[in-house]
Image: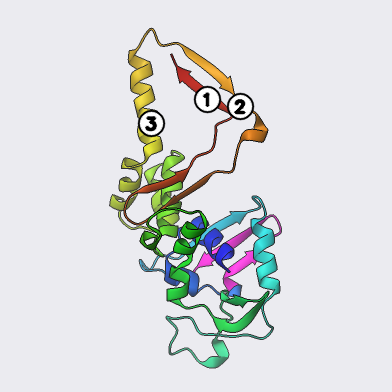
């Protein structure tokens, strides 16, 4: 459950209640990817995002789905007055001892996923990793990848550009690129040397940010490192 929540939360910049309210019918498995719909959001803007077949993400989702007991139905948290006949099966159920129960996961349990992951990664200040970290980490990954503000805004479903601008402004990756452009562009005597790193020595990249604006990163070795002499 934790792995699937982490995948969907970061892939879709999801709020905790959005994950809790996800139903099986909100996710379409098209073979090479998952199409996920978030019908009800804080800003009243429905969102759609895609989870592609990277690593074993789709395999983990399908395995989790296969462990669900049959004929399970629940109401979403925001559907308190919906008749029982229209209740849909919530996606996240409690998972224990290799199987799922029929009890849906609540908001508090879902909100603890980031702290559980941070504890597994042996990061400091585990208590600072709240449910909002999934959404924050998603936006930070996009900003570090150089994605424009409009795309970040649409991905997270923000009405205002102010929040999106904050992620781009505080992105260390962006600041590093700017620093290199300034220093390399103004230093005519700069000499660059390319160093190749073996593929087998490249570990996986983990970028997980807590809610105290402190970056917690385990950065990978790039395939080619440029050293300024």
* Mark 3 → mark 2, Cα distance in angstroms: 21 Å
* Mark 1 → mark 3, Cα distance in angstroms: 14 Å
Local crowd size for mark 1, using a 10 Å CA cut-off: few (<14), some (14–19), many (≥20): few
Is 29 magenta? The answer is: yes
Span shown in magenta:
25-39
Residue 23 image offset from top left, x and y in percent: 56, 75
Quarter-of-image position of residue 8 = bottom right
Q: Nearer the viewer, residue 181 or 115?
A: 115
Which numbered disc flags the more N-terminal residue, 2 or 1? 2
Which residue is found at the position 48% from the left and 59% from the top? 119
Residue found at the far bottom of this picture: 84
Which residue is found at the position 43% from the left and 38% from the top? 146
Residue found at the far left of this picture: 162
Quarter-of-image position of residue 5 = bottom right
Residue 73 image offset from top left, x and y in percent: 59, 85
The quadrant of the rendering that contains the C terminus is top left
> Vertical placement of 103 versus 4: above or below?
below
Q: Badges 2 and 1: C-beta atoms under 8 Å apart?
A: yes
Q: Secondary structure at mark 2?
A: loop
Q: Secondary structure at mark 3?
A: helix
Which residue is found at the position 51% from the left and 15% from the top? 193
Query: Is residue 214 among the parts visible in the rendering?
Result: yes
Which secondary structure class fits the magenta region best?
strand
Residue beneath disc 1: 225
Q: Badges 1 and 3: C-beta atoms under 8 Å apart?
A: no
The tag on residue 176 is 3
Local crowd size for mark 3, using a 10 Å CA cut-off: few (<14), some (14–19), many (≥20): few
The tag on residue 197 is 2
Is 7 magenta? The answer is: no
Which numbered disc flags the more N-terminal residue, 3 or 2? 3
> Vertical placement of 108 versus 189: above or below?
below
Residue 77 image offset from top left, x and y in percent: 44, 81
């Amino acid at each position: 459950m934790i792995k699937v929540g982490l995948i969907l939360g970061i892939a879709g910049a999801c709020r905790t209640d959005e994950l809790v309210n996800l139903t099986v019918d909100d996710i379409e498995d098209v073979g090479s990817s998952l199409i996920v719909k978030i019908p009800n959001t804080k800003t009243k803007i429905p969102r759609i995002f895609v989870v592609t077949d990277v690593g074993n993400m789709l395999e983990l989702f399908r395995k989790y789905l296969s462990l669900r007991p049959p004929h399970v139905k629940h109401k979403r948290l925001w559907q308190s007055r919906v008749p029982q006949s229209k209740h849909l099966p919530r996606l996240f159920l409690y998972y224990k001892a290799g199987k799922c129960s029929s009890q849906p996961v609540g908001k508090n349990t879902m909100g603890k996923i980031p702290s559980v992951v941070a504890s597994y990664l042996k990061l400091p200040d585990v208590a600072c990793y709240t449910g909002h970290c999934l959404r924050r980490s998603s936006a930070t990954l996009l900003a570090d990848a150089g994605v424009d503000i409009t795309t970040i805004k649409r991905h997270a479903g923000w009405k205002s550009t102010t929040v999106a601008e904050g992620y781009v402004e505080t992105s260390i990756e962006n600041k590093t690129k700017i620093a290199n452009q300034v220093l390399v562009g103004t230093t005519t005597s700069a000499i660059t040397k390319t160093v190749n790193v073996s593929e087998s020595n490249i570990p996986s990249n983990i970028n997980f940010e807590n809610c105290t604006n402190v970056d917690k990163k385990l950065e990978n070795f790039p395939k080619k490192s440029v050293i300024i002499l």
